[in-house]
Amino acid sequence: MSETTSVNIPELESPPVERVELESMLVMNIIKHCRDSITNVGTIGQLVGIDIDGVLQVSSSFESPSVLENEESAVNKSVSGRARQAHTEATLNRMQYLGAVTGHVGWYQGTYVGAFLNSSFFVETQYAYQKESPNSIALVYDLSQSCNGSLILRAFQLTPEFMAAYEEKTWTVTSLNKHHVSPANIVRELPVAIHNSHLATCLLHSLSEPSKPSSLLSSEAALDSMERELPLTETFSNFDLNLGVGHKKNLEHLLESVDEYHYEQGNVGFHQRQLAREQAKIQQWLTKRKAENANRAAENRPLLPLDEWKRIFKLPAEPRLLDSLLISAQIRQHCSQVDEQSLSFVSKLSGVRNAYTS
Amino acid sequence: MSRFFKGGSNDSDAESVDSSEGNRVVASKTKTEESSSAEEESSEEESSSSSASESSESESESESESESESESESEKSKESESDSETSDEDKSEQSETDSEEDSESSESESGSEESESESESASESESEGEAESESESEESERAGPSSFLKKPEEAKPAGSRFLRGESSEESSDEEEGRRVVKSAKDKRLDEFYSVIDNMKNAMSGNKWMVVSNEFDQLNKIAQKSSEAGRRPPAYIEFLSNLDQKVEGADKAFIKSLDAANGRALNALKQRVRKISRQFTSEIQRFRENPEAFMKPAAEVAEVPKPAAKAGQDEVIVGGVATRGIVAPTTDEPKTEEISPSDIFKHLRAIFEARGKKSTDRTEQIRFLEKLSSIAVTDYQRLRVKVALLAARFDINTGSSQYMPFEQWNGALKELHSILDILDANRKVVIVEQVEDEFEDEEEAVAASANNNGVVQIQGSVVSFLERLDDEFTRSLQMIDPHAPEYIERLKDETALYTLLVRSQAYLERIGFVESTSRLIMRRLERVYYKPGQVIRANEESALRALSPDFDLAVTPRATTDTPDKLINALCVYLYNHGISLLRTRAMLCHIYHEALQNRFYKARDMLLMSHLQDSVHAADIATQILHNRTMVQIGLCAFRNGMIQEAQYALQDISTTGRIKELLGQGIQAPRFGQFNPDQERLDKQLVLPFHMHINLELLECVYLTCSMFMEIPVMAAASAASDARKRVISRPFRRMLEYTDRQLFTGPPENTREFIMQASKALAEGDWRKSEELIHAIKIWSLMPDTDKIKSILSDKIREEGLRTYLLSYAAFFDSVSLDSLAETFDLPLQRVTVIVSRLLSKREIHAALDQVHRAVIFERVEINKLENMAISLSEKTAQLHEANEKLYEQKTQHTNPQDNRRREKTGSVKRRNDRSDNRGRQDMN
């Protein structure tokens, strides 16, 4: 916070980020912003901070105009994108004017049960950021688990492989193969650490007095008195046997993704059939041409070129695999979430069973 | 006129000769005029050869002279031939001609006496004769030979005159006279010669275009005359000459002609070659010996003539005798004078005339009937009757009409009498394959020596029977089934059946297995669809018509006294001896009969064990129709036995198509989208079964819908109760109708069967089984079923049971427990039955409940699947789909040897694995 000059350090020379440190205030900010606009999934904002020796210290954030539903069309995209750009620049200028840190190190997005990869918005934006400064990160805050008392805040970066593939923008099988892109390595997650400022720590210490209740964290009426005394100790919400909405939502999203994937699969299949048909035609043409050439050779006439088919036939364009790639990644994400949640739930269930049997 | 002139010439009346000579001169003049006119035409084209034309003119004249001479010569030779033939013929015939002769001569005398006064009437009769000859070429044709027959007698006194070269005037006079009066044949002949003259003229003048045209005409004439039975030998002669001449024309010669003529010559050459190829043998014969050729050709051409038209000839012979005075009533006595030994000749003539366009079939039949009355020996009678049967079946050719009743009955009688003869005389058999066809009985008998003394006659009793049967069916197809005529016609079936039984005995005797099986199939097809009493009555009446000691090997009287045994015996014979098609059909008929006799299990087992359903798609349409009928009958049988589900399954295939009529062969499909195909329609119509064989379609529909109701209503109730029910449709037509009834704003009282069933269904769905029962019982068509009351009671039981099931399925959600007693009371069922039904529901897991035996109650349990579980299930389904699609894609890819996709597949595979895992989680969560 004190090193205002760090803005001048060229990012290119800095080593790649290995860790993200967040200011607690910033986290609160993000949570508040996302909660306020819970209906709007495309809630985004900008992160300001500094990276030092592979550690990205994010100190503050500010909101951006949210992503609209109709941003799919190119015109709307560019218009609102420009508006966001202008807003970001203006805010950064004002912060500079105030003397705060103005290193633009990334952005954050509010999401619901981890559904952020299924549209190309995330990768497009992140690509733009990383293109500008390779150390930019994307913070994803998941609202769904907050009501269960756990905070899910994850930092992502696009992998260099994906960046390279994105550079090419062909999204064909060959391109993906060349860059070794797979659904598993589209993004890379960075460890996140939340760092309290000294002032905040002091405040917490002063809060340890039992006089200040924190109703937000309470869930069990029976434990109210206990909580009143120990506001920052563990709650018993972890013993809640209800799996919660998150799980259901997760499955819903998973179903949706599978459907989408199915659609993409249909596209690939169609292309394949088309291709096969076209290739058969070419093969036919080639054999005909070869026979003709054999005749010509017998008559000592000049041979006809064999590669003319490229002119005559037009192979069908290969479908863009970006979407299916992203959907795969998304499915992966959902599955891992199901894994995580079920894991804790199953352990809870077995605990309950033991309690009953004993 | 000719006759009078003939008479004149016989009397050697100088005047008539003179006049005829004048006539001839005129004729020749006209001829020359013709040729000269032809000349002129050609001279217009080619002015240079005028001198040549002149010479050719003279030539043609001389030629025409010689032609007429040669013709008269040939005529004479013919006459002498026919003369000798007549002498060869029987005395009776001789006497006949004599008598004819007498009458004629007397007439002609009177004619000559009153020639002046009569000439008018004569000319009238002539014109009549002309008209006759024009209208019926055959008849005029016949006039030729008949006059030949007469001629010798007339000519005999003045025979010397007919010596060659004696007087060309005389003969040409004859010819002249004949030309006027006599046949188209002679006209044709004249035309023929004039054409040949023209050609010769044109040839000598090198006018090939003319030759070419004339040649066409010549061919036409030759064609016509050869159709009429005789090709003039002069044609062959000329053809040969022309061939030589044209072939002789070398290139240099063609070049010397101008372009048009050259081309014509070339074309002509081609055609001559082509045509002479057809007559190679004749030409060869002619070249070897022109003289001999001209004579035997005439003979050969002449001999078959009386025979060829013998059928009508006889009548006309009389007609000729009285011609001019018009007395067709004299026909009858004349015809009786055919001697039995001539029969074969006449028969042959008739066979030759068979199938020809101009043959008058009714006339043939009449003639054959007469012949059959003349025939003496069994052999003769059989031969004639076989021919007569064939003629009767020939009476109409198109498939659009049926055989007239009298002809059909006649054929039936004929067959009976054939069988009579065959039964009486066991030395004669009718078989399909005879080694040699014999003209005479003696020959046949002689040949039979090496055949155990059995005389064989070409023919097929089975084919005749089949034809008779087909005609019967066809007539039934075409007669309006609601007309009394139809019933009348149907009565003939007994006679037909009797005949079938009788012929069976015959065929068993001569031991033709194939024919016998065909016949037995026919017999089976006449009985299989009938109820037992009808078969019995039929059988009895058939046997009553036959002699009491009459018995059959396949279906002996003693053992086949009941319809079942009869059908069984017939079918078993066919299983053992028939070809595969007959076996299939016999099987179907057998099953049909069993189903008709209410033996459902036997019918079903037979159907299933025969595996007919696997192969019936490849069978012919008639067999498929039979199969469909059988299936329907099985369905109806199941229904009569109260087996609702079986009935529904059996009727399902037919009823859901919407083309029931067509599939059962009870009607034809209306042309769709204006694609009208008359041929197709005709064929379809042939497959339609006669009305009395029809299965009542309304009854069929009623049964099907009722069965569907019993099955669908509980299923629908179950589906509406359970949230996740997959839509299982048993009967689409039923669902559609129910939906249609639901859509209606106002439902009035039911009017037709369908409405009754629909409203009953709705009542049943609401649990109001009493109303449902009432409605179902109100359907009138049940009365068409035997044992109506029994069926109604079955239906009532069924309605109660299904009502109970429906009630439980739809209202289970609203009860915690239901007492079995109250259920039994509500649905008027015994407690035991209620328990059975409930237990079945429980065991099939259609309702989630338990049976409390102690308190006699059903206790319902409620298990609700939550949303998460639902989703987990659908997820697992979707992933399975995805996986399948992936496999398919991969297969495609590897086929096209594109290895790039392997990785991709692995990727999706891993996704799937993960999905499965999440799925398992979901399942775990449920527990």
Image (cartoon, coloured by chain):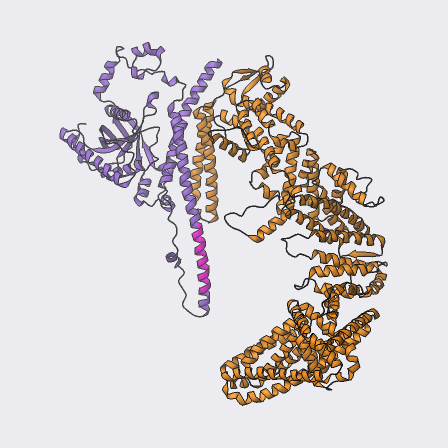
Chain colours: A purple, B orange
Depicted B480 relative to depicted B35: above or below? above
Depicted B148 relative to depicted B453: above or below? below
Q: Is residue A91 visible?
A: yes
Q: Nearer the viewer, residue B54 or B760?
A: B54
Queried whether the magenta region covers residue A289, the answer comes back as yes
Q: Quadrant of residue B774?
A: top right
What residue is at 43 percent from the left and 25 percent from the top? B867
Queried whether the magenta region covers residue B424, the answer comes back as no
Main structural element of the magenta stretch: helix, strand or loop?
Answer: helix
Left or right of residue B214, residue B471 in this image: right
Q: Nearer the viewer, residue B487 or B299?
A: B487
Left or right of residue A254, residue B819 in this image: right
Left or right of residue B134, residue A218 in this image: left
Depicted B824 relative to depicted B590: above or below? above
Depicted B668 relative to depicted B332: above or below? above
Q: At which x and y percent is residue B876?
A: 46, 31
Q: Nearer the viewer, residue B416 or B761?
A: B416
Q: Which residues are magenta?
A: A276-293
Left or right of residue B766, residue A197 in this image: left
Q: At which x and y percent is residue A290?
A: 45, 62
